[in-house]
Image: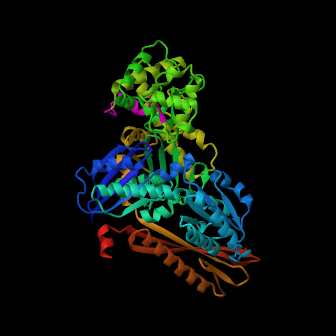
Amino acid sequence: MALLLGIDTGGTYTDAALYDSASRRVLRSAKAFTTKHDLAVGIGEALRAVLPGGNPGEIGFASLSTTLATNTIVEGHGSPVCLLLIGQGAESLGRSGLGEVLKGDPVAYIPGGHSPMGEAQQPLDEAAARAAIEQHAANVSAFAVAGYFATRNPSHERAVAAMVRETTGLPVTCSHELTSNLDAPRRALTTTLNARLIRLLHDLVHAVQGELAALGIDTPLMVVKGDGSLVSAEAAILRPVETILSGPAASVVGATHLSGHADAFVADIGGTTTDIALIRNGHPRLNGKGATVGGWRTMVEAIDVTAIGLGGDSEVHVLERATRPEQPFELGPRRALPLSLLALRAPSVETTLAYQAGKARAEREDGLFIWKIREAADLQALSRGEQEMLKRLHDGPVSLGGLQEDYVLRQGAQRLVERGLAIRAAFTPSDAAHLRGDLSGWSLRAAELGAEIWRKKAQAAGWNELPDTASVGAAVYEQLTYQAAQAVAAAAATAENPDEPGVAALVRRAARKPREGALLSVGLRLGHPLVAAGASAGTYFPAVGERLATEAVVPLHAEVCNAVGAVVGAVIQRATVLISSPLGERYRVHLDDGGRDFTDLERAYALAEETARRQAFAAAERAGAGGIAVTMERDDLRASVGGTETFIESRVRATAVGRPMTAAQRAAE
C-alpha cells in the first residue's frame, strides 16, 4: 500500500508522521509549534520537516486531526448563524443552554413540526420560512434548521433547507442529519454549533490542501472525527461538529495501534492537558450521552475521555503549608510558557531572572512574564490598558514583577491573555525536566533560576525542605506523578462504578507517595495496562504505572501517536431506523420521506434493515471508504402489560466500516 501522511494540531505542537502501512512503521516524524492565529502555518512547517525533499512518492492519503472545533466552541468563537426552529417556541431557548449558545445570533420560529408518531402537528408555514431566510441571509454565514420531532419525520426540515439553498446558496445544517435522538432543544444546539463551524473547517481544509499542493502532493485528505473514525474532508466540512475531540481521539487510536494492547487505559500528556480514555477490544469507549465541550452537552457521539488541566507546560503554583501539608506545589490547570523556552527566544529574560533569584525574598510576581503571541485584529476593540500593554510587548517579554504598582497595565495584561493575544510564562514541569536531565534543548540556566525563585516562594509559604534547585525539580516531578496517577485511577473508578461513595478520597490517598509513619496505607491496582502517549510520556508515566501497580507502556513514536492515529483509523458510518407502534397491531417504520405502516412486524423489520443498511453504506462511500462491510443490530423495547408482552418500539442500526480509499484506488474508479 502507498505511504500515509498523518497530521495533528495540538495546543502546543503540530505533529506530522509519514507512515508505511505495509510494514506498520513510522518512517519519519516531526514537530512544529502550533500557530493558533493560523493553524495552516504550523501544519506547513511540520509537513516540510517530515518531507524535507517534498513528495517522497505516492502518498495514498493524508489525514488531519484538529482542535479547531473544540477550541472554537470552548472560546465562544465561530461564524454568525441563523437558527430556524420549526414547530417550537421561544421557551426552547431556555433548555439545554440553547439561548446561551446562540450568543445573540438570530432565531426564527416557523409554524410546523411533527408529532412523536411522525404526523404533521400543523402544516409548514412556507411563507414565514422564506421571509425569515431573506431577512437574515445577509448577516450570517450559515443556517441551522431544527424541527419538532424531525427525527420521526424530517420532511419539514428538508423543505426549509431546500429554500435556504435556493434563496441564498449558504450552507445549511438539518438536525435530523446529525442525530436520530430525541430532545429537540439539544438537537437544535448541536445543529447551531455545526452551522457555526462550517466556514472555519472549510478554511482549514483548504489551507491544508494548499500546503500539500505546495509540496507537490495530490492526494485525498481525511479528517478524524471525535469517535476516532475517519471521514473525507468534503464530508467533514458539512458536519464539522463531529470533529469535537478529534485530537484526543486520534491520539488514543494511535497509541492503541502502536502499543498492540487491545484492552488498556490510554493517557495522552500534552503541553496543556492530559486526556485519559479506556480501550476495550481495540476500540475506544464512546460517550453515549454525547460529548460535552465548553459546558455544552451536544449530541455528537465521541470518545469518552477524561481531560484534566495537567501537562508539561502546566503552571507551578506554591501552596501554603498550613493548608496543604503534603506537597509544596500544585500544577495547572492553567498553561504557561516554560521559562526555559521563553529565554531561548528572548535571552534578556535570563538577566531579569538572575536579578529576581538573587533577592533574599521572592515576591509573588517574580519569575512571571507575559509575552505577545499574535497581533490584535482590531486595536479599537481593546481597552486603554490592553493597548498600552501591547505597546510594551512590542520589544519582547515583560516581567509581571514590574507591573505590581500599575493596576491598569496588570488588568490589560490579564485581558490580553484571556483574548489569546498573549501568554503567561512561568516555571513549569518542562523546566523541572531540564533540571532532572529528562529534557534538553532549551535554556537550562533559565530553568535553574526559575527553580531558585520558586524555592524561595515555597520557603515564604512555610516549606523549608527544599535546600536547592534539584529538590524543586524532584518535588515538581512527584506532584505531576501524583496528579496523573490520581486522574487515571479516578477515571478507572468512574468507568467501573460512577456512583460508588468514597472513591475520590481513596483514590487521592492511594495515588499519593506512601508517607513514613502513616496510620493508613491504601493501594490501587489498575485492571489494564497504562499506555502513555505524548512527547513527555516516557518521562512521567513509568512512575505513574508503578504507583498504580500496572504495566506502563510507552510505545515507540509515542510523541506522535496523534498523527499516527490520524491515518490508521477506519471510516465508520452508522444509520438508525426507528419502528414504532402508534395504534394496536400497526407498526410504523419512520423514513426520511415520512412513515410506512405494516400489520406484520417482520415486514417492518425487513424494510427498516434494508433502509439502514443502504443509508450506512452510502454514508461510508461519501466519507471516502472502500471495501465496506455492514453489520446490523436491533434494540427492541417491549413491556409486559397484564401478563402479555407488548411491542413499544425498536431501533434498527447499521454500521458500515471501511478503509479510506487511496488516490490510486479513487483514480481506478
Residue 510 relative to residue 470: left or right: right
Quadrant position of the C terminus in the picture: bottom left
Specify whether residue 436 is painted magenta.
yes
Name the residue: 65% across, 73% down. 156
Residue 59: give x, y in percent of width and height.
Answer: 28, 61
Name the residue: 64% across, 87% down. 600
Does 210 sit above or below residue 145? above
Residue 628: give x, y in percent of width and height.
Answer: 40, 73
Q: Count of labels shown? A: 0
Q: Which residues are magenta?
A: 422-441
Does 141 sit above or below residue 518? below
Residue 82, by quadrant, is bottom right
Q: Judge whether residue 282 can be spotted in this image.
A: no
Residue 4, by quadrant, is bottom left
Nearer-the-camera pick, 609 or 504: 609
Name the residue: 46% across, 42% down. 548
Nearer-the-camera pick, 424 or 39: 39
Nearer-the-camera pick, 398 or 5: 398
Residue 641: give x, y in percent of width and height.
Answer: 75, 76
Residue 513 relative to residue 608: left or right: left
Nearer-the-camera pick, 665 or 455: 665
Q: Residue furthest top?
A: 360
Residue 602, by quadrant, is bottom right
Specify whether residue 101 is painted magenta.
no
Name the residue: 52% across, 81% down. 610
Q: Judge whether residue 266 can be spotted in this image.
A: yes
Quadrant position of the N terminus in the picture: bottom left
Residue 399: give x, y in percent of width and height.
Answer: 47, 24
Colour mapping used in the image: rainbow
